[in-house]
Image (spheres, grey):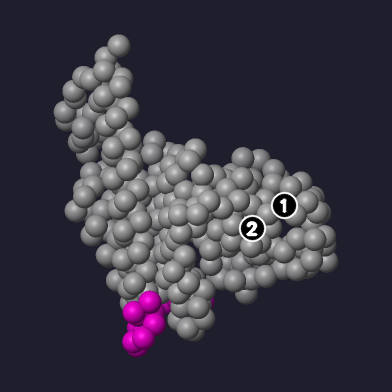
């Protein structure tokens, strides 16, 4: 049976060119495009990572988007480099990027970019930050890349194909009880002014787990849970660019995602709970303790 394949859309989402191919040809075309997207996402993350690494050697220009929410000139340079590559190779794709280089023309493809996750760490020369790139296809994240240029660690996943660290498969930990687990979390930039600030959860988990860390990069936190270095993660008020890539890497590594009540997670939600799956129920119980 033949099936239509649309090569491009206009600004109103209407097909500009429609060709008809058999299903095998459609499948081959789709796989070829994803292969190209995968290669470009990895290339872009590594290029941006080198910009971050080089930027640590020079003088940073820092400005503020809020009282504590800072941005550096290197955030901008990193995002510009990633977007330039996407524009060159996939000019019809949508883009959602933290520093505002968005493109919203109709397309089934959307690149979700955090050019520097862990900006506060970066500004203080604390070596825990990364580049995060996720790719949505028809509203579902299909590919994720997180690159830590300091440790030269590239975390990668493609839906239904597993998760990898520098091309080696990774899996979540085997820790089965919260009491034996090492957790990680973070705090939003309005932590000093909003009473919904995560301190209550931090205290409760500190009393229940073996340890709790706060690293300053949600994308790397998710990858560390995915690779078994940590066992669980929770946070409030995250954005799609914080979680798009890492959430897929986690689930492809065998982890579990939900909101704080156990309902299905979306990268557009305000609550995120991620774990190795084995301690997920116990973590939900702790999060529900004060509700």
Dot 2 crowding, Cα within 10 Å, few <14, some 14–19, many 20+: many
Q: Secondary structure of the magenta portion, mostly?
A: loop
Q: Position of residue 118 (x, y in %)?
A: 49, 71
Q: Residue at x 69, y 43 (%)?
A: 262
Q: Residue at x 53, y 63 (%)?
A: 220
Dot 1 crowding, Cα within 10 Å, few <14, some 14–19, many 20+: few
Residue receiving disc 2: 228
> Mark 1 and mark 2 in contact (Cβ < 8 Å)?
yes
Q: Report the label total.
A: 2
**Front-most of residues 291 and 285:** 285
Tell me the magenta residue range: 53-70
Residue 100 seen from this side: no
Which residue of the protein is positioned furthest toward the left in this rendering? 17
Q: Residue at x 66, y 61 (%)?
A: 230
Residue receiving disc 1: 174
Q: Secondary structure at mark 2?
A: loop
């Amino acid at each position: 049976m033949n099936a239509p394949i649309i090569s491009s859309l206009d600004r109103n989402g209407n097909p500009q060119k429609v060709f008809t191919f058999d299903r095998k040809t459609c499948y081959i075309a789709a796989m070829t495009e994803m292969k190209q997207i995968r290669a470009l996402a990895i290339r872009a993350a590594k290029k941006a990572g080198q910009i971050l690494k080089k930027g640590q050697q020079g003088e940073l220009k820092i400005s503020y988007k809020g009282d504590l929410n800072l941005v550096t000139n290197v955030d901008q340079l990193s995002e510009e480099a990633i977007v330039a590559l996407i524009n060159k190779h996939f000019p019809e794709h949508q883009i959602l990027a933290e520093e505002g280089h968005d493109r919203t023309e109709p397309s089934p493809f959307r690149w979700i970019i955090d050019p520097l996750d862990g900006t506060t760490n970066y500004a203080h020369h604390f070596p825990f930050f990364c580049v995060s790139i996720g790719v949505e296809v028809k509203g579902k994240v299909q590919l994720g890349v997180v690159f830590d240029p300091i440790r030269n660690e590239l975390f990668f996943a493609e839906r239904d194909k597993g998760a990898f660290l520098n091309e080696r498969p990774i899996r979540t930990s085997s820790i089965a009880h919260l009491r034996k687990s090492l957790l990680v979390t973070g705090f939003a930039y309005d932590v000093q002014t909003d009473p919904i600030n995560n301190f209550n959860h931090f205290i409760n988990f500190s009393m229940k787990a073996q340890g709790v860390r706060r690293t300053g990069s949600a994308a790397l936190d998710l990858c560390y849970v995915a690779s078994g270095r940590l066992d669980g993660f929770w946070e409030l008020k995250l954005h799609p660019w914080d979680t798009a890539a890492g959430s897929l890497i986690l689930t492809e590594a065998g982890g579990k995602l939900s909101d704080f009540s156990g309902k299905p997670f979306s990268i557009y939600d305000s609550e995120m709970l991620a774990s190795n799956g084995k301690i997920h129920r116990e973590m939900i119980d702790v999060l529900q303790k004060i509700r």
